[in-house]
Image (cartoon, rainbow, N blue to C red):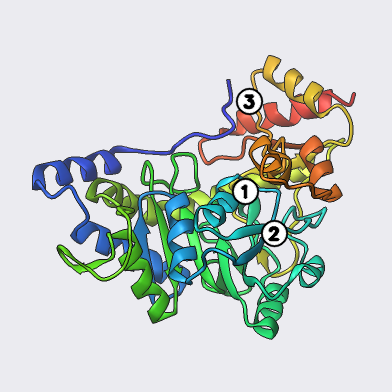
Amino acid sequence: MIQVSIPVLGDEEKRAILEVVDSGQLAQGPRVEMFERGFAAMCGVKHAIATSSGTTALQTAILAHGIGPGDEVITTPFTFIASANAILVSGAKPVFVDIDACTYNIDPGLIEQSITPRTKAILPVHLFGYPADMESIMDIASRHGLAVIEDACQAHGASIGKQKVGSFGTGCFSFYPTKNMTTAEGGIVTTDDDEVADRARLVRNHGQRQRYYHESIGFNFRMTEIQAAIGIVQLAKLERFTSVRRQNAGYLSERLRGVITPTESPGYYHVYHQYTVRVSEHRDLLADRLREFGIATGIYYPVPVHKQVAYQKLGYQDHLPVAEEAAQQVLSLPVHPMLSQADLGKIVEGVNDRWS
């Protein structure tokens, strides 16, 4: 079976783990600091604050911006639920805005009509590794005095022009096993704002600068030395991984028939965490056929956040037609760096034969 995504780990990561074990320093230490410096340099920012997961990175960033009860944060309904949940657990309210039909990212043209006196931030998601329209979003945020927190959990190394995602506002990344690079689990917050960085470091470590002296409420959101050791090795491989993903995506886009392939506007650098096509009719039948043909697929995401039972119980009654239609039509195909040329050919054959 050709898997839709797999972690890509080798002997270098194994050696890095063993070095940590032999050192006896397992909790956050020098390797975390080294990883943070490297990731900050990759993103082109002053600060990177490593956390235990992408979800805790989002929670850390939201709290570091002082967002809490009574506040609202504008975000997308078409994403993994962690983006909205991180807003909820801060005590704030997620306000959902529909998406662009081509990019699947939040539609900037709909944001301003959802801004209220309670709005404190915009939280776009760079879905599938494709950057959201940050020029428009940053312009709106600037005019209304709003923070911008980028959910870049699927977009390591993605960029618009020469500027990397995670450097427009406050960035949040995930290093879950199937992301474009991994630390097994883990996350990171990126920012150029010294005050946000300082508060983020307090949030992730029980509100303390000096051990047992707590100046604010915080949590144990720390990254371990083992996670960071893996991350240091993976970060060095990220550019190569991304190049292969983009080559694989190009191969598929040139040859697939009967589906709408991903978009990439001039100046936008897509890193293809997922290669997501759109199937206007019989999406699930195509997925079943590909599975029988030995090709795994994924549906990201079958239910928009505002339609999830958990959010329906909270009283969300939004009708967001573009996101709702996308949920019925998207299908992600394998694009990861471990695919062989034969695998790619088989994926094309499996999809195209459906339309023969």
Q: Which of 349 and 189 is in front in this view?
A: 189
What's the amino acid at mark 3?
Answer: Ala
In the rendered view of the protein, which quadrant contains the N terminus? top right
Contact between labelled residues 1 and 3, with CB atoms less than 8 Å apart: no
Element carrying mark 2 = strand
Q: Mark 1 points at which residue?
A: 247
Q: Quadrant of residue 331?
A: top right
Q: How crowded is mark 3: few (under 14 residues within 10 Å), some or many (20 or more)?
A: many
Residue 310 visible somewhere in the drawing: yes
Q: In this view, does 24 lie to the left or right of 304?
A: left
Residue displayed at 50% across by 58% down: 90
Q: Mark 3 points at which residue?
A: 296
- Tell us which disc is closer to us: 3 or 1: 3
Image coords of residue 23 (percent x, y): 9, 48
> Distance between the Cα atoms at labels 2 and 1?
37 Å
Counting residues from the N terminus, which is met first, the one under dot 2 or under dot 3?
2
Element carrying mark 1 = helix
Q: Is residue 148 above or below residue 221?
A: below
Q: Is residue 169 left or right of residue 207?
A: right
Q: Nearer the viewer, residue 73 or 201?
A: 73
> Distance between the Cα atoms at labels 2 and 3?
34 Å
Contact between labelled residues 3 and 2, with CB atoms less than 8 Å apart: no
Q: Is residue 109 above or below residue 238?
A: below
Q: Name the residue under label 2.
A: 95
In the rendered view of the protein, which quadrant contains the C terminus? top right
